[in-house]
Image: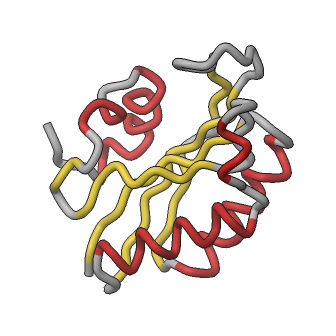
Amino acid sequence: MHRYIVCIGSNYNRKENLTFARQELTESFSSICFAPELETEPLFFKNPALFSNQVVMFFSDKDEEVVRKMLKDIEQRSGRRPEDKKEEKVCLDIDMLLYDNRIVKPEDWQRGYIQQSLSAFHSSLFIK
């Protein structure tokens, strides 16, 4: 069984899109838990729309590439389109941060809101 930590985020129809992501992830993966949802300022965007972000931990026997494709499929089904990038509109973004004990996105992993969310999982994480 592999451990995954992902972050879901949206700056457009935030409530609906995060609810959709939580439902899809819960249906797809076992032993899932969600850190509290956080509202954050946009990083690297001119668009001032706030983001809702939530860190999620789950376990799956599926390998990393299969899970990555599943996450991209959830993003697309939420309405995410390539042309939205120009408008800095993010219906749903799901970033894989951790696979087993390997940090997949070190820069994202160090962000304050990610670290704050990870503290909710502190008792079950053993990562430095």
- The percent coordinates of residue 12 (x first, y second) are 81, 38
**Which residue is painted at 53% across and 18% down in the image?**
44
- The percent coordinates of residue 47 (x first, y second) are 73, 18
Q: Considering only vertical position in the picture, is 61 above or below 112?
A: below
Q: Considering only vertical position in the picture, is 85 above or below 69?
A: above
- The percent coordinates of residue 122 (x first, y second) are 32, 42
Q: Nearer the viewer, residue 32 or 67?
A: 67
Quarter of the image that includes the N terminus: bottom left
**Which residue is painted at 16% across and 54% down in the image?**
102
Q: Considering only vertical position in the picture, is 73 above or below 18?
A: below
**Which residue is painted at 51% across and 60% down in the image?**
33
- The percent coordinates of residue 20 (x first, y second) are 76, 62
Rendered image quadrant of residue 60: bottom left
Q: Looking at the image, which residue sits at the far bottom? A: 61
Rendered image quadrant of residue 73: bottom right
Judged left or right of residue 2, residue 112 is right
Q: How has the structure been colored for display?
A: secondary structure
Quarter of the image that includes the C terminus: top left
Rendered image quadrant of residue 27: bottom right
